[in-house]
């Protein structure tokens, strides 16, 4: 039986149907990003109660918050090799299982080190999801909509952050107040302390992710690499219709099916790695070094420290998370229209200006006799505007676009391995920024700390301008090592002129 008879012919309606299928697959894979966002924020509502429950020092408390990021770096590093060996969807299931185990273990720790261990386990699962989701989405998406679908990863991340904040608030309100009249997550709710429920609820998205990973088809590029051509054609007929055989042939041309990809494949002359891998590492690093997670991990503490009430600081944090969701939708609408590089340049310039505004405002802060920091009018308002402008520019550009590029910029043969290294670098930089902010802000002051983030934003502009090549509209099979070949660049420009 001919493949056309088995799978049916393509038409305008069929093309729409295929696109719908691809979107559904991308949404399913992006649930890993939801776990990423949820895990990174759920600790915020529980950390003070945990510190009180285990009598933690400030250093140990900070370590418990940040140590999951080191686990994420390990997970990201391992994910590429595992994905090339066992397949994208099987590794998704592994990530879901690890996150579910972490949610349960973190809910019932018997000591601080035990909690830290389960946080690392969950971090490994999140690191895996952070690599596999963008790789899988890039490998099943047509070039015309790949950027929008790749942006779903960031949308899922910010939704996970928002849901975690809402979940924490729900259990904190359910716990009620203590003898001092303050909300206390150590109070009992349905037999457990409220902070335990905050972690335990993470089992739900982990199970959903695992079930979805068992339902979606394997990446056609993995199947071709393993010589499972008929299975690859079946998946491609679902996503691209009658172009499946042509697409399979193009994939086959770019893959050495008798070679098992390893980390050795990304070695090159530029300090031991291919230049394109260093570009991915730098993109990942700059995404974190501009200080975005300072806003999401420490925003309540930050605004309290410059004169806002705790209630107002919490409301500002929620508003910021909602704003992040809205601007991510803007990025999804723009990434395939104006291109990746242009969006990154706009974002770098906007982040530098907005962070600069906040930095100038922080230079006007004063400290009273009790050690409290105050930021009078109009500087408090300017700092708030600058910080939220920063979130807008980051959320509409660097947040989603870096994930899009990491999923698509590497050649087929090294994609999983290179993405693992780049994502591991991102998690390490995330960890460094997270643990350094309290020390830098205390020892050097907020102006110097935010001045460093301004410098990183400026450097990110220079880097993108000189080192990043536009990939909008190119098929994954056209991606080359190092810089894209000039004929490909010209062909891409002609295609969009």
Image (tube, grey):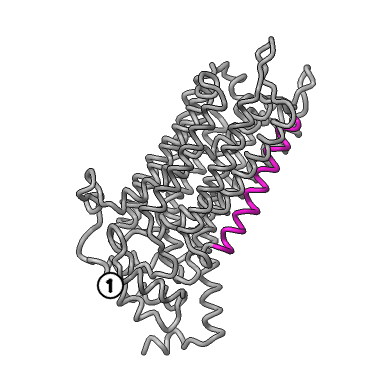
Position of 211 relative to 426 (above/below): below
* Total numbered circles: 1
Magenta stretch encompasses residue 323: yes
> Which residue is found at the position 30% from the left and 72% from the top?
487
Magenta stretch encompasses residue 465: no
> Which residue is found at the position 45% from the left and 71% from the top?
142
Q: Nearer the viewer, residue 295 or 414?
A: 295
For the question of whether residue 257 can be seen, the reply is yes
For the question of whether residue 205 can be seen, the reply is no
Magenta-highlighted residues:
311-334
> Which residue is found at the position 25% from the left and 52% from the top?
274
Please indicate whether residue 131 sits to the left or right of residue 441 in the image: left
Please indicate whether residue 483 sits to the left or right of residue 65 in the image: left
Dominant secondary structure of the residues highlighted in magenta in the image: helix
Where's residue 68, x and y in %? 47, 35
Please indicate whether residue 179 sits to the left or right of residue 223 in the image: right
Which image quarter holds the N terminus?
A: bottom left
Where's residue 396, x and y in %? 57, 53
For numbered disc 1, what is the local secondary structure?
A: helix
Where's residue 253, x and y in %? 26, 72
> Which residue is found at the position 66% from the left and 43% from the top?
320
Please indicate whether residue 55 sits to the left or right of residue 413 in the image: right
Position of 101 relative to 64 (above/below): below
Where's residue 440, x and y in %? 50, 24
Question: Quadrant location of residue 294?
Answer: top right
Position of 263 relative to 411 (above/below): above
Residue behind mark 1: 252
10 Å neighbourhood of mark 1: few (<14), some, or many (≥20)?
some
């Amino acid at each position: 039986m001919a493949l056309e008879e088995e799978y049916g012919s393509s038409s305008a309606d069929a093309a729409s149907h295929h696109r719908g299928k691809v979107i559904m697959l991308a949404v399913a894979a992006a649930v890993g990003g939801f776990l990423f966002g949820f895990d990174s924020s759920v600790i915020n509502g529980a950390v003070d109660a945990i510190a009180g429950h285990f009598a933690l020092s400030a250093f140990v408390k900070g370590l418990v918050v940040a140590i999951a990021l080191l686990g994420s770096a390990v997970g990201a590093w391992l994910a590429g090799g595992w994905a090339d060996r066992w397949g994208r969807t099987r590794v998704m299931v592994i990530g879901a299982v690890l996150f579910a185990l972490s949610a349960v273990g973190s809910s019932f720790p018997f000591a601080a080190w035990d909690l830290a261990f389960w946080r690392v386990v969950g971090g490994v699962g999140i690191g895996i999801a952070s690599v596999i989701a963008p790789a899988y989405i890039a490998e099943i998406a047509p070039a015309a909509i790949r950027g929008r679908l790749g942006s779903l990863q960031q949308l899922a991340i910010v939704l996970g952050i928002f849901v975690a904040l809402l979940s924490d608030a729900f259990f904190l309100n359910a716990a009620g107040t203590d003898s001092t009249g303050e909300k206390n997550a150590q109070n009992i709710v349905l037999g457990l302390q409220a902070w335990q429920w905050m972690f335990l609820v993470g089992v739900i998205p982990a199970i959903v992710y695992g079930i979805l990973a068992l339902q979606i088809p394997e990446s056609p590029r993995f199947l071709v690499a393993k010589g499972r051509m008929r299975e690859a054609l079946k998946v491609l007929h679902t996503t691209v219709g009658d172009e499946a055989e042509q697409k399979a042939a193009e994939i086959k041309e770019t893959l050495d099916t008798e070679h098992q990809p390893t980390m050795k494949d990304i070695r090159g002359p530029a300090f031991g790695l291919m230049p394109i891998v260093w570009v991915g590492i730098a993109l990942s690093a700059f995404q974190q070094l501009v200080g975005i997670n300072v806003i999401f991990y420490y925003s309540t503490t930050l605004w309290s420290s410059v004169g806002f009430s705790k209630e107002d600081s919490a409301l500002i944090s929620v508003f910021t998370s909602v704003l992040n969701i809205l601007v991510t939708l803007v990025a999804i609408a723009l990434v395939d229209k104006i291109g990746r590089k242009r969006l990154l340049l706009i974002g770098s310039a906007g982040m530098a200006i907005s962070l600069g505004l906040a930095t100038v405002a922080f230079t006007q802060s004063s400290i009273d006799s009790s050690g409290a920091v105050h930021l009078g009018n109009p500087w408090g308002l300017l700092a708030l505007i600058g910080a939220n402008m920063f979130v807008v520019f980051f959320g509409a550009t660097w947040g989603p676009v870096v994930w899009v590029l990491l999923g698509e910029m590497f050649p087929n043969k090294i994609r999983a391995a290179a993405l693992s290294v780049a994502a591991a670098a991102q998690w390490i930089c995330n960890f460094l920024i997270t643990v350094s902010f309290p020390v830098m802000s205390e020892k050097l002051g907020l102006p110097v700390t935010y001045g460093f983030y301004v410098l990183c934003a400026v450097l990110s502009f220079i880097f993108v301008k000189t080192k990043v090549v536009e990939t909008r509209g190119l098929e994954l099979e056209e991606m080359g090592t190092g810089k894209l070949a000039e004929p490909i660049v010209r062909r891409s420009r002609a295609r969009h002129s």
